[in-house]
């Protein structure tokens, strides 16, 4: 089932065109990654998809009653503002302690409820943001560079958590990231963006596409291969569950 | 009872302190300290205009504060940082206000009363305005509490949760203008920001949640007003500055407690 369909999308800011001729769709349960260099319109696309900005051209159709969970890029909390994790999860809509606990467990941080937000490590903080995003049992989870500031093992663990959440809750996941090698292996589909959709498809198809190589150089192709190798390795020993990463396009 | 000027002063001080505390928390959390200053300094222009057009000082200050706040919001953008815009507007408004007052013939304006406050001269109407304004501000904060908090934490998350961050910013700005308008007679334009920030800062080391911090700031604000007024009466010192001194003293104690706690673990 289509959750969001965008057709012929264009967004113009004053003086420049951020996006043009973008066709995009996301289905229930898919993991899609949007990659692209800085200023390629990734965040603009996200904002247009969720309806935070109006497209200058084209249409965006969202499933009626679509519930979206959003994990922001990063969040700075003023040290002058004392707030516990539980209280933070209860804003702006109050949720029960049981709901908080379930969300924290799903996000992999079951024991943080009483902690002060400012005392969390980078990885814990992002998982709390993740818990916040899944509180409302969303149909679609959107993450905008959610692992910025995490080290490589940290972000790899974070994305494994996302896959687990997708399995548990069946929600679709839309990622924006520049950490290609970590993200792409977990995706069903990759969309390479540079003002328009350069190329899209299964991760390995995109990684070998000439448009993609022109943007990111062939070096990342090697890193991707390296990671995929590593991934299979971990997969065989530590992860008994089957991963399915076949392209959906 | 209200015929006693000291009772009126105590009631006015208490009202301003109770309302300024929780609002001050938002000022501190959003790093708007300078915003409070700007609005308060602009209030002198409001006083001058009110006197020349013969309307109530409260109305004049309220209107100018709201205008300055709106100007700040619209001017701050890419070219000018918010601190620069505030610096320009705050001091220009204060200067224009001082010049404008000097043009007022026939009216002898006791400028000191508006710069430093004249709490011992508050009338029954002033007390009424302070409490209407104070209760109004506390009511607004209570009503919009969750929305204000999430908009303060992150405009993006607010948006995602169905809260419009610009609207919450506007609500805070209006509340700030109201507090400045009612507080100008109590502590004066130069010290209003102190009454916003110091109780909130003093409450911080003692609080674990935003709610307790706001309640404590309110209590500390009220206590500072009463203690300061009492001390001013006893030692024959100017009331407004003495109230701020009392708040500073409470801050010092709270900061010491905070430091000791961190030492001990």
Image: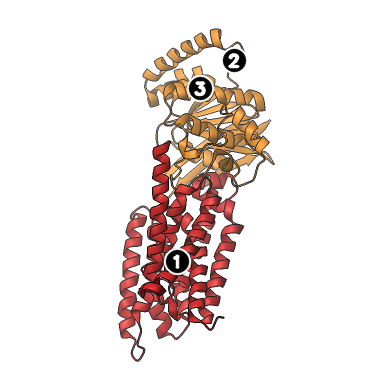
Chain colours: A orange, B red
Number of dots carrying numbers: 3
User: What crowding class fits label 1: few (fewer than 14 Cα within 10 Å), some (14-19), or many (20 or more)?
Assistant: many
The residue drawn where x is 37% and y is 59% is: B34
In the image, which is nearer the foreground, mark 2 or mark 1?
1
Q: What element carries label 1?
A: helix
Asked whether residue A129 appears in the rendered view, the answer is yes
Cα–Cα gap, marks 3 and 2: 15 Å
The residue drawn where x is 50% and y is 17% is: A204
User: Mark 3 — residue?
Assistant: A157
- Looking at the rendered image, the quarter that the C terminus of chain A falls into is top right
In the image, which is nearer the foreground, mark 3 or mark 2?
3
User: What crowding class fits label 2: few (fewer than 14 Cα within 10 Å), some (14-19), or many (20 or more)?
Assistant: few
User: Mark 1 — residue?
Assistant: B227
User: Mark 2 — residue?
Assistant: A243
Say whether residue A208 is left or right of residue A243. Answer: left
Cα–Cα gap, marks 1 and 3: 55 Å
Query: Closer to the camera, A75 or B114?
Result: B114
Residue B145 location in percent, x, y? 58, 54
């Amino acid at each position: 089932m289509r959750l969001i369909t965008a057709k012929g999308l264009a967004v113009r800011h004053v003086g420049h065109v951020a996006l043009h001729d973008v066709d995009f769709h996301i289905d229930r349960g898919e993991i899609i990654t949007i990659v692209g260099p800085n200023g390629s319109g990734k965040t603009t696309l996200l904002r247009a998809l969720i309806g935070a900005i109006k497209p200058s051209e084209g249409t965006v159709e969202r499933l009626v009653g679509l519930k979206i969970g959003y994990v922001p890029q990063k969040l700075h909390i003023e040290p002058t503002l004392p707030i516990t994790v539980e209280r933070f999860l209860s804003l702006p809509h109050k949720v029960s302690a049981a709901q908080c606990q379930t969300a924290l467990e799903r996000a992999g941080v079951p024991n943080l409820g009483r902690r002060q937000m400012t005392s969390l490590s980078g990885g814990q903080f992002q998982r709390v943001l993740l818990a916040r995003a899944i509180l409302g049992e969303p149909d679609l989870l959107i993450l905008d560079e959610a692992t910025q500031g995490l080290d490589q093992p940290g972000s790899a663990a974070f994305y494994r958590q996302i896959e687990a959440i997708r399995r548990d809750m069946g929600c679709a996941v839309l990622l924006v990231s520049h950490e290609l090698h970590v993200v792409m292996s977990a995706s069903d589909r990759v969309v390479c963006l540079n003002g328009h959709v350069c190329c899209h498809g299964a991760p390995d198809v995109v990684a070998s596409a000439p448009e993609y190589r022109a943007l990111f150089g062939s070096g990342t192709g090697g890193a991707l291969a390296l990671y995929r190798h590593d991934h299979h390795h971990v997969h065989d020993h530590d992860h008994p569950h089957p991963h399915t990463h076949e392209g959906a396009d | 009872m209200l015929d006693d000027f000291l009772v009126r002063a105590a009631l006015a001080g208490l009202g301003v302190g109770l309302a300024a505390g929780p609002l001050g928390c938002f000022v501190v959390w959003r790093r708007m300290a300078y915003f409070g200053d700007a609005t308060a300094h602009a209030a002198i222009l409001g006083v001058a205009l009110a006197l020349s057009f013969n309307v109530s000082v409260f109305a004049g200050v309220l209107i100018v504060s709201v205008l300055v706040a709106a100007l700040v919001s619209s001017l701050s953008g890419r070219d000018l940082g918010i601190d620069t815009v505030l610096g320009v507007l705050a001091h220009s408004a204060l200067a224009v206000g001082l010049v404008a007052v000097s043009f007022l013939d026939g009216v002898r304006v006791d400028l000191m009363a508006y710069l430093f406050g004249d709490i011992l001269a508050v009338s029954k109407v002033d007390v009424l305005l302070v409490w209407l304004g104070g209760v109004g501000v506390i009511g607004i904060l209570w009503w919009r509490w969750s929305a204000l908090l999430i908009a303060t934490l992150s405009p993006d998350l607010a948006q995602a949760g169905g809260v419009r961050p610009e609207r919450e910013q506007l609500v805070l700005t209006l509340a700030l203008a109201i507090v400045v308008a009612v507080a100008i007679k109590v502590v004066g334009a130069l010290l209003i920001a102190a009454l916003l920030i110091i109780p909130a800062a003093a409450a911080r080391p003692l609080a674990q949640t935003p709610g307790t911090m706001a309640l404590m700031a309110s209590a500390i604000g009220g206590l500072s007003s009463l203690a300061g007024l009492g001390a001013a009466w006893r030692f024959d010192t100017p009331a407004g500055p003495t109230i701020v001194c009392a708040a500073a003293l409470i801050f010092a104690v709270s900061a010491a407690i905070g430091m000791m706690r961190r030492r001990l673990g």
